[in-house]
Image: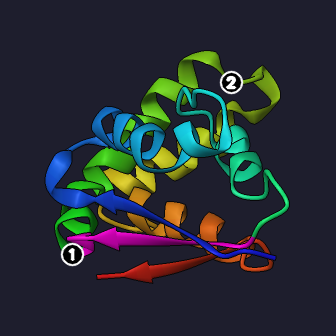
């Protein structure tokens, strides 16, 4: 198995739409496809292909700030508009937490998803 290294640069974005573009540029374009920000699809892209890979997230401390609780609240507010009615109370509760600076940040959630796919991809935060 040939290891590949992909680079995501936190200096290239300051919000979630920017992260989507950067993740497409730095990773998805190399494995095939175009990610639209759906978190299930984000998970799926991480194990595409048969090669192990490393994602080097440069300037990750900037991303940690940029994709904090405010970014999570914005993502959840947008998700609340389109989620299944049975999920609305759960999404609303998470949104209320994020607005109060509680619960995981968007950055932490993205890192968690990557870490859950450690069989396929390693994450290096720089």
Disc 1 secondary structure class: helix
Q: State the image quarter where residue 51 is shown.
A: bottom right
Which residue corresponds to mark 1? 61
What residue appears at the point 63 percent right and 43 percent down from the top-left corner? 39
Our reading of the magenta stretch's main secondary structure is: strand
Q: Is residue 116 left or right of residue 104?
A: right
Residue nearer the viewer, 74 or 17: 17
- Quarter of the figure that contains the C terminus: bottom left
Q: Position of residue 45 (x, y in %)?
A: 70, 47
Q: Position of residue 123 (x, y in %)?
A: 52, 78
The residue at which mark 2 appears reads as 83
Task: Report the front residue among 122 and 101.
Answer: 122
Q: Where the N terminus falls, by quadrant?
A: bottom right
Looking at the picture, how far across and down is residue 70, in whole percent? 26, 49
Q: Residue at x 58, y 27 (%)?
A: 34
Magenta stretch in the rendered image: 52-60
In-front residue for pair 75/53: 53
Residue farthest along the top direction in this orientation: 82
Secondary structure under tag 2 reads: loop
Q: How many marks?
A: 2
102 relative to 12, above or below: below
Dot 1, how many residues are within 10 Å of its Cα: few (below 14), some (14-19), or many (20+)?
A: some
Do tag 2 and tag 1 residues touch (Cβ < 8 Å)?
Answer: no
């Amino acid at each position: 198995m040939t290891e590949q290294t992909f680079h995501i640069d936190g200096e290239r974005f300051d919000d979630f739409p920017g992260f989507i573009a950067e993740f497409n540029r730095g990773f998805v374009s190399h494995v095939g496809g175009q990610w639209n920000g759906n978190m299930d699809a984000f998970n799926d892209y991480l194990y595409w292909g048969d090669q192990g890979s490393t994602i080097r997230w440069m300037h990750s401390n900037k991303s940690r700030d940029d994709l904090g609780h405010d970014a999570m609240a914005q993502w959840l507010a947008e998700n609340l508009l389109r989620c299944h009615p049975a999920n609305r109370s759960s999404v609303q509760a998470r949104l209320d937490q994020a607005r109060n600076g509680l619960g995981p940040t968007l950055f932490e959630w993205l890192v968690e998803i990557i870490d859950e796919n450690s069989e396929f991809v390693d994450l290096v935060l720089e």
